[in-house]
Image (tube, grey):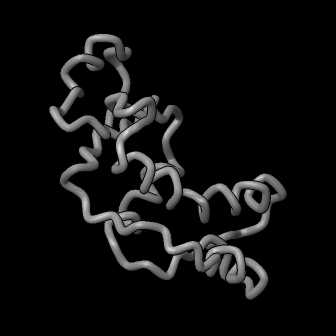
Amino acid sequence: MKILIFDGCCNNGIKNIESLLPKESRTVNIPLSKQNILICTGCMSCVWNMRKMNPGYCRLNDDMKLIYPTFIHSDLVILMTEILFGGFSFQLKKVIDRLLPVLFTAPLKKRGKDVG
C-alpha cells in the first residue's frame, strides 16, 4: 500500500502517526513547510486546458508539479495539520486548492481517456 502524508504541522508531527501505519506500507511524507507551493490564483487555466485537450495542467511552476504524480499513484492520502483558529494550516490549504487540476481529471481517467 502506498501512503502519502501531507504534513502541514509546524513541528513535524510525522513521528506521532508512523506507529499507526501498517508496517508493510510504503510511506511518502511531504513536509509542507519545506515545499515551495504557490497560492492558487483562481485563473482556472486547469479547467480551460481541459477543453484544449491538455487536462489538469496548472500554469504555476512550483513543487506541486513533483507532488501531483505521487498523489495520483497513492492508495491512501493522510492530511496532517494543527488546528489553528478552528481550521487547518495555510500550508495544507494551499495544497488542497492546488489539487483542483487532479480532481478535475479524475472523471476522464475513469472513462479510460488518456490525460497525460
- Quadrant position of residue 16: top left
Q: Is residue 44 above or below residue 36?
A: below
> Toward the viewer: 73 or 82?
82
Q: Looking at the image, which is closer to me, 65 or 38?
A: 38
* In the depicted structure, whether residue 115 falls above or below residue 2: below
Q: Is residue 46 left or right of residue 29?
A: right
Q: Is residue 93 left or right of residue 107?
A: left
Q: Is residue 37 left or right of residue 39?
A: left
Residue 43 place in picture, x, y as percent: 59, 79
- Where is 29 relative to 36, above or below? above
Residue at the right extreme of this rendering: 111
| Residue 9 pos. (x, y %) | 26, 35
Residue placed furthest toward the left: 11
Q: Quadrant of residue 46?
A: bottom right
Q: Residue at x 36, y 36 (%)?
A: 5
| Residue at left offset 46%, top offset 59% | 68
Identify the residue at image location x=46%, y=58%.
69
* Nearer-the-camera pick, 85 or 71: 85
Q: Is residue 2 visible?
A: no
Q: Residue at x 27, y 12 (%)?
A: 19
Q: Residue furthest bottom?
A: 52
- Given residues 105 and 2, the one toward you in this image is 105
How many numbered circles are shown? Answer: 0
The answer to whether residue 4 is seen in the rendering is: yes
Farthest front residue? 85
| Quarter occupied by the C terminus | bottom right
x then y, percent, for residue 42: 58, 73
Question: In the rendered image of this protein, does residue 44 appear above or below residue 90?
Answer: below
Q: Specify whether 81 is left or right of 35.
A: right
